[in-house]
Amino acid sequence: MAADLPVPTPEGPHGSARRTRWAWYSYDFGNTAIEFAIPLYLTVWLVSDLGVKAWVFGLASAVSSWAIGLSGPYIGVWADERRTRRLWFTLAMVVATLLLGSLSLLPHAGGSDLAVLIVVAMLGNYAFQLTSLIYNASMINAAEGDNIVSLSSRGMALSFLGGAAGVGIMELVVSGRLVPGVTGRGYAMLPAAVVFLACSVPGILAPRLWSQQTSVPQRPTGRLHHRMFELWRESSSEYRAGWFLAGYFALNSSVMGLTLYLPLHIRNITGFEGLKLLAVFAVVVPMSAVGATIVAVLRPDRRTARHIVIVGLVLLGLNALVFSLMRTLPLVVLCASLHGLLSGALTPTIRAAYAQTFPSDYQALAFGLYGAVQRVSQGLGALLSPLAGAATGSGSTAAGMAAMGVLALIGAPLFMRWRLGAGPDSRTQQAIPAPTGVAASEHEER
């Protein structure tokens, strides 16, 4: 497993190729258990139960996200050129599982104990986020012979369902009904880590996810950062990737901000707490799965995917503005449902579309850059979290939601500058055509 080696031609959609796709889906299913556990349980446990200052946890979370954003592209190009994507993924998965799963077992009585707890949590979060960046680089291999946007959307639909299932398991554990004597939110990360581990193993054991088309990629000249710059220059020239990432930054910042303000706004409007608030907020999750499923069924080509992104982003922003004005429960539930539907359709479409901006040999680099934008914007959301939590009154939360709606609308014209590029329809596309320049010879060899 020191390097990712080429494998024979796939047997077809009914053989090993289908098993490879299910290995891909498996990771998406387990990944969201951690994604949901951190804000729903870990944050509440540290801030509310153990007394960690909200701004301290927000800053630590932001630093963790920014660290993966800064290092992810370098790790990606390193893994691409040395054919070690699977090794990086396996190491990051093991580290994330051990660190996040051990949090409930660490002492947390005094200030120094809490400091260690936060450091372990953030290191585990860093490793967990790294697994996502490396794993997304296998999307083209998983989509072998299939529509890549459809594959991404099916995986994302399963991820929302997996997150809901993970929350159910975590709730059984923290309530004390599953394991006698084990109770409290501090234990939530242990079952989440176990689910994540179990769902990651099939991907590690699927060699086709990690194989690449040639034994050695066509490398640009120069040092690591010079090679990265040259690959980025080509991608920007071919697809205007910079505009794509700028639009994605606006979109992800908006979605993260809306996720923070949405439950607070519902609480301020309805007065709901506890299970009632969770029930209203939980409508977002299945609707997100529905949105992703609709895109999967559509099997959009490149042009249709672009329309989904731009139109969906405008609708997301307008819905947020309308949501900020709602004061009755039925309309609140309707707007929350639309938010889930639109975000569920947009996220996997953008993830798959971005895979088309770099040569297939450099997908880990591509998603390192993609993850950098994702995690930096997520880090801003983490810093916004204490402010959102301190917001009182429907006016303050409404203003926050309206601001996120405006941010989403700003992203639409940025995405409109994104260039589709030439190449075959993604309905039948297996490998994405390489850009011009240093990768042209590689494309000709294929």
Image (tube, rainbow, N blue to C red):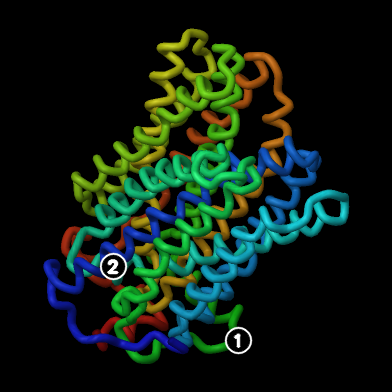
Query: Which marked residue is nearer to the observer: mark 2 or mark 1?
Result: 2
Q: Earlier in the sequence, mark 2 or mark 1?
A: 2
Q: What residue type is labelled 1?
A: Arg
**Mark 1, secondary structure of its residue:** loop
Q: Which is more toward the observer, 193 or 247?
A: 193
* Residue 320 seen in this snapshot: yes
Count up the numbered dots: 2
The structure residue drawn at horizontal position 39% and vertical position 19%, both measured from the top left corner, is 334
Does 90 sit left or right of 305 as displayed? right
- Work out which quarter of the rendered image holds the C terminus and state it: bottom left
Q: Which is more toward the observer, 355 or 99?
A: 99
> Which label sits on residue 142?
2
The structure residue drawn at horizontal position 22% and vertical position 53%, both measured from the top left corner, is 301
Task: Rate crowding at label 1 as few (under 14), some (14 to 19) or many (20 or more) other CA atoms within 10 Å.
Answer: few
Q: Residue furthest front?
A: 180
Q: Against 141, is 325 above or below? A: above
Residue 387: image x %, image y %?
A: 72, 32
Residue 336 appears in which quarter of the rendering?
top left
> Which label sits on residue 120?
none
Residue 376: image x %, image y %?
A: 62, 53
Residue 247: image x %, image y %?
A: 48, 47
Q: How far apart are marks 2 and 1 (CA)?
A: 31 Å
Q: Against 311, is 244 above or below? A: below
Does 145 sit left or right of 352 as displayed? left
The structure residue drawn at horizontal position 56% and vertical position 45%, both measured from the top left corner, is 180
Q: Against 25, is 167 above or below? A: above
Q: Which is more toward the observer, 152 or 21?
A: 21
**Mark 2, secondary structure of its residue:** helix
Q: Which amino acid does label 2 sit on?
A: Ala
Whether the residues at callouts 2 and 1 have beta carbons within 8 Å, the answer is: no
Residue denoted by label 1: 223
Does 290 sit left or right of 252 as displayed? left
